[in-house]
Image (cartoon, rainbow, N blue to C red):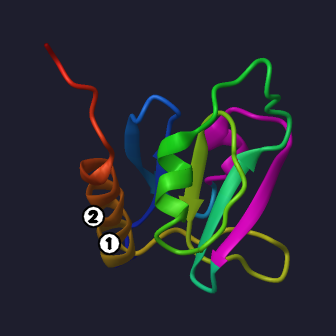
Amino acid sequence: METQTFAFLVQPTGGFRLLHWDTAATPHAALRADAVRPVDITTQLTMWVDDDASVPRMQMNAPAVGLLLAYQERVHPYYGDVVFTGSTDAEDTPHGLTEDQALALLDRYLQRRAQLPRARRH
């Protein structure tokens, strides 16, 4: 029985999805992008960004940046959708997140979202 793996897609709007990840899945397909770039977060976690995402055309992905701050002290802004996967092999082929990794990442994401200040309603 094959173990199911996942990727975690985060949109600039705060929307997110857990994607099923298999050996045929690619960050290119998940991001619908021609050029993607890996950003190493930990030895077991990689974030993929659209290398063609330009500042004027795309919205900064504040939710993903907020999630990154849970792992790193200083981060760069990223634009457009991003996708998180597990580690990569020697050929930069991404492995999916295990169910435990995916749920831990989702939990961290939801905790960071809950800590963001909300606009007051009058």
Residue that badge 2 annotates: 107
Task: From the viewer's perspective, tell me whether residue 74 is left or right of residue 12.
Answer: right
Vertical arrangement, residue 58 with respect to residue 108, above or below: above
Q: In what element is the residue under mark 1?
A: helix
Which mark is on residue 23? none
Quarter of the picture containing the C terminus is: top left
- Residue 22 in view, yes or no: no
Disc 2 residue crowd, few under 14, some 14–19, many 20+, Cα 10 Å: few
Using the rendered image of the protein, determine whether residue 49 is visible from the camera's viewpoint. yes
- The residue singled out by tag 1 in the image is 104
**Mark 1 vs mark 2, CA separation in Å:** 5 Å
Q: Nearer the viewer, residue 62 or 92?
A: 62
Q: Judge whether 94 appears above or below 43 on screen.
A: above
- Spot occupied by residue 54 in the image (x, y as percentages of width and height): 82, 29
Look at 65% across and 38% down and name the residue there: 31
Q: Secondary structure at mark 2?
A: helix
Relative image position of residue 119 (x, y in whole percent): 28, 27
Kind of residue sitting beneath label 2: Asp
110 and 49: which one is in front? 110
Is residue 35 on the magenta stretch?
A: yes
Height in image: 33 above or below 19? above
- Quarter of the figure with residue 104: bottom left
Q: Residues within 10 Å of mark 1 (few under 14, many from 20)?
A: few
Number of disc labels: 2
Where is residue 29? Give x, y as percent. Answer: 67, 40
Q: Amino acid at mark 1?
A: Ala
**Mark 2 and mark 1 in contact (Cβ < 8 Å)?**
yes
Q: What are the residue bounds of the magenta stretch?
A: 25-41
User: Would residue 52 be counted in the magenta stretch?
Assistant: no
Q: Position of residue 116 (x, y in %)?
A: 33, 46
